[in-house]
Amino acid sequence: MHTNVNIIAKILAASVLFVAISKYELLLMIPQINIGFWIQYIGILGIVIFFISAIISFVGIYLKKKWGFIGIYIFIISACLLATPTVPFAHKLFPQTAQIYVIFTINLICLFGAFWLHKEQRKKEIRT
């Protein structure tokens, strides 16, 4: 079971990194954000957290560190705020009007899946 948990966690981490790489245009938007002083910095901070948490989760999961899951949790929350699905291109299978709900549902399923994977990995650590 624990080998499957590690494989699924690595697939989720790779998906997170792939989504972050596919959304590189968010980094190009940073110089264009000019709404207001505080709102501008909140938007920039959200985008930076999105990319940093993707890198942290990928590295952490592949090194089998506990903090890798924390990166996944933060990434999924920031992906929801940026209306980005954790599973790439899955929302494109649905009509435009339903895509935001599909994105939220996909991210919620991935978040609960990450919780479950983290719990299973911690159980394995306690047994050994």
Image (spheres, grey):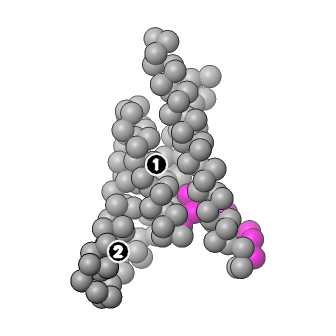
Left or right: 6 in relation to 104: left
Provide residue 47's location: percent of width, then percent of height.
36, 68
> Can I make out residue 22 in this image?
no
For label 2, the residue is: 43
In the rendered view, would you say 78 is above or below 99?
above
For label 1, the residue is: 73
- Does the magenta segment cover residue 15? no
Instruction: Report if the CB atoms under discs 1 and 2 are less than 8 Å apart.
Output: no
What's the residue type where badge 2 is placed?
A: Gly
Q: Residue at x 50, y 49 (%)?
A: 14
Q: Residue furthest top?
A: 128
Provide residue 51's location: percent of width, then percent of height.
37, 61
Judged from the image, the secondary structure of the residue bearing numbered disc 2 is: helix
Prevailing secondary structure of the magenta residues: loop
Provide residue 126's location: percent of width, then percent of height.
46, 15
Q: Residue at x 41, y 71 (%)?
A: 24
Foreground: 2 or 81? 81
> Can I make out residue 9 in this image?
yes
In the rendered view, would you say 118 is above or below 57?
above
Left or right: 61 in relation to 104: left
Disc 2 packing (10 Å; few <14; some 14–19; many ≥20): some
Q: Residue furthest left?
A: 37
What segment carries the magenta color? 84-95
